[in-house]
Amino acid sequence: MVQGSSNPPDITAPGLLVTPSEKDIYTAVKAWITSILPFSITIRQGQQNDVAAPIGPFMLMTIIDRERIATNGWFYTNTERVVVEQTQISMQISAFGKGSGNLIQSVLMLWRDMSAVDALAASGLPIAPLHTSAIRQLGFINAEKNYEDCWSVDLILQANITTRIPQQFAGKLTIDTLEVDTTYPPKE
């Protein structure tokens, strides 16, 4: 089921919790894009149900790919094993409306700049920009059946995804010795 305004994700469902979550990644990337643009623009997560397109220029962010880029690492706490997977995440950023090509060009140029590195590091999340795809123009027909500008780029980032597994440990070990021949007499 695609999440939307009428069906938010069930965060109480059983299963393993991963961090950073998709929501965390969307929030950090949106904050960075907002910080580099010279004016305010509506930026939303893509693939939402029952949500009309905003009036005026807007952007959509959609995670479109995840790829493992290294073997898992792990460490232990007192009660769990923490598994870390280095993951390459591709997030498509699409800009709609007049001037959207220039907006996407700015996003592409600054993704590999220190502003993106610093902003994502300041988020406190284990994420960092890697590279981008080429910019592409996409056909977009609005509700009035008119063509509108739509430009898109994929921002590629690395996220060190963590999950925690409950683990039992032996905190104390008692060793008893026994006389084998007495306890288990040999049979002849």
Image: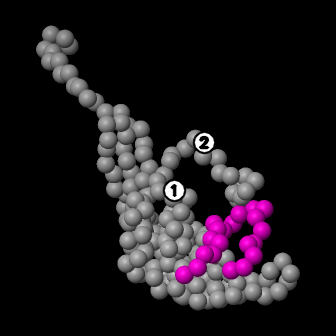
Residue matched to label 2: 12
Q: Is residue 183 above or below residue 25?
A: above
Is 96 in the magenta? no
Quarter that holds the N terminus: bottom right
Relative horizontal placement of residue 47, taking residue 89 as reference (left or right): right
Q: Residue at x 58, y 89 (%)?
A: 102
Secondary element type, mark 1: loop
**What secondary structure is the stretch in magenta mostly built from?**
loop
Is 41 in the magenta? yes
CB within 8 Å, label 2 to label 1? no
Which quarter of the picture shows residue 23? Answer: bottom right
The amino acid at mark 1 is: Ser
Relative horizontal placement of residue 86, taking residue 138 as reference (left or right): left
Identify the mark at residue 3; answer none if there is no mark: none
Within 10 Å of the Cα at label 2, are there few (<14), some (14-19), or many (20+) other Cα atoms? few
Residue matched to label 1: 21
Which quarter of the picture shows residue 13? Answer: top right
Residues shaded magenta? 38-57
Q: Is residue 15 above or below residue 30?
A: above
Q: Position of residue 86 (x, y in %)?
A: 40, 63
Secondary element type, mark 2: loop
Farthest residue, direction right: 144
Which quarter of the picture shows residue 61? Answer: bottom right
Q: Nearer the viewer, residue 54 or 85?
A: 54
Q: Position of residue 168 (x, y in %)?
A: 35, 33
Q: Residue at x 55, y 44 (%)?
A: 15
Nearer the N terminus, badge 2 or badge 1?
Answer: 2
